[in-house]
Amino acid sequence: MESYNFVVTSSPSLADKIHAEVSARSASAEAAFRILDARIVACELCPRLRAYCAEIARVRRRAYADWEYWGKPVPSFGDPNARVLALGLAPGAHGSNRTGRPFTGDGSGNFLYPVLYATGFASQPLASTREDGMVLHNLRITSVIRCAPPGNKPLPSEINNCAPFVDEEIALLQDLRVVVCLGKIAFDGYVAHALRTGKTSSRKGLVFRHGAEYAIPNGPHILATYHPSLQNTNTGLLTRAMFQSIFERARALAGLSSSSPAN
Ligand code: SF4
């Protein structure tokens, strides 16, 4: 009796192909961000800001006397394939200028990250250091300038100096659908970016107010919120419920399923 040996060859399924494509895209996006981050960290374009950050890192706050402050420009943080970008103003002098990660280690971050956790963007509610295990899903955090400014007030020339980094970062986020602007300076910074890059031809009608939402012709949706600074949160100008509803709305606009804590 003749016997036959069958060799079963399995071709990759559609799911396998999609998974491989997504993994390759993630790897290349991560590599591109790593190169951009290295340039940001090495930037010395604003002497006033570099001197201020170095001095803060040298003197330190008494509560952080044991810390070795980051003291350099702060790169962005989060998912390289994010659909939502949270755009802040600048690193905090004793927050991210100390820890090296946006909104990590200060009162603003202690307000922001629990909301990101509750709305499914963050893996944990507390952010303390760059090594705390935090992972962001579908969200990236950056700011209009990467060096802490004295009094939280950057000069227009300093915002201009840092603008190319904002442009490059946004160009790398190929599936970006929503930009959440944290405060008026971030909102103005994003509108300036939209004008520079042709996402809109006019800033007419683009007015900052908490909860404002704009669809612009060639760019992602804009959502505006008060900045989660202690000044705003301690006075009740920005409450947890107000802030959470902004990020829930961001999920909906980005086509993400409704919020649940991320893993
Ligand atoms: S604010 Fe931006 S442009 Fe200015 S020194 Fe820092 S990283 Fe460079």
Image (cartoon, rainbow, N blue to C red):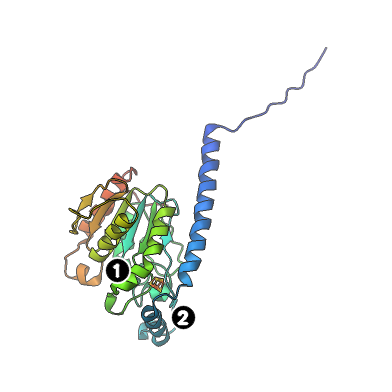
The x, y position of residue 257, in whole percent, is: 34, 43
Going 25% across and 62% down the picture, which residue do you hit?
188
Cα separation between marks 2 and 1: 21 Å
Instruction: Give the residue number, with chain letter if any, for mark 2.
Output: 68
Going 44% across and 50% down the picture, which residue do you hit?
81
Quarter of the image for residue 186 reads bottom left
Going 36% across and 81% down the picture, which residue do you hit?
48
Going 42% across and 75% down the picture, which residue do you hit?
45
Q: What amino acid type should be assigned to the residue bearing mark 1?
A: Ser
The mark nearer the N terminus, 2 or 1, is: 2
Residue 108's disc is 1
The x, y position of residue 54, in whole percent, is: 42, 82
| Quarter occupied by the N terminus | top right
Tally of marks: 2
The x, y position of residue 158, in whole percent, is: 34, 73
Please tell me how crowded label 1 is: few (under 14), some (14-19), or many (20+) other residues with Cα within 10 Å: many
Q: What amino acid type should be assigned to the residue bearing mark 2?
A: Glu
